[in-house]
Image: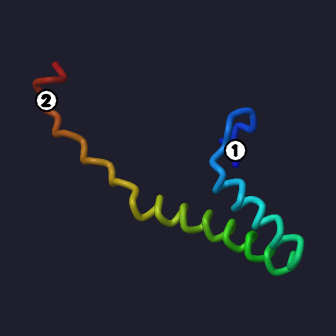
Amino acid sequence: MKGINLRQPQNFRWMIVIGLVMALILFSSQYVLFLLALVYILSGVLARLSFVFRRPTAPPPPPQDEASHA
């Protein structure tokens, strides 16, 4: 939603999806809003877990020669 520019033409499918979500919120708001909040929370947790498990380990520093310090 952050990247949507309403001054440019949008894909019609996105407009249908947004309309359907708004209709679902209107007709069964308690369940839909709970589901949206749950998905939002889980996406943050899963993103953080994927960052932790995919984080590359730092390579070991190269060995230093005593001659290079002189």
Residue at position x 34%, y 54% in the image:
56
Observer-nearest residue: 3 or 51? Answer: 3
Residue at position x 14%, y 23% in the image:
68
Q: Position of residue 66 (x, y in %)?
A: 13, 29
Q: Position of residue 24 (x, y in %)?
A: 81, 73
Mark 1 lies on residue: 2
Q: Position of residue 26 (x, y in %)?
A: 89, 71
Observer-nearest residue: 44 or 69? Answer: 44
Observer-nearest residue: 9 or 57? Answer: 9
Tag 1: Cα neighbours inside 10 Å, few (<14), some, or many (≥20)? few
The image shows residue 21, relative to residue 12, as above or below, that is: below
Secondary element type, mark 1: loop
Cα separation between marks 2 and 1:
54 Å
Image-quadrant location for residue 54: bottom left
Which three-letter amino acid code belongs to the residue tagged 1?
Answer: Lys
Secondary element type, mark 2: loop
Residue at position x 54%, y 62% in the image:
47
Tag 2: Cα neighbours inside 10 Å, few (<14), some, or many (≥20)? few
Image-quadrant location for residue 43: bottom right
Instruction: Mark 2 or mark 1: name the one nearer the start of the chain.
Output: 1
Residue at position x 68%, y 38% in the image:
9
Mark 2 lies on residue: 66
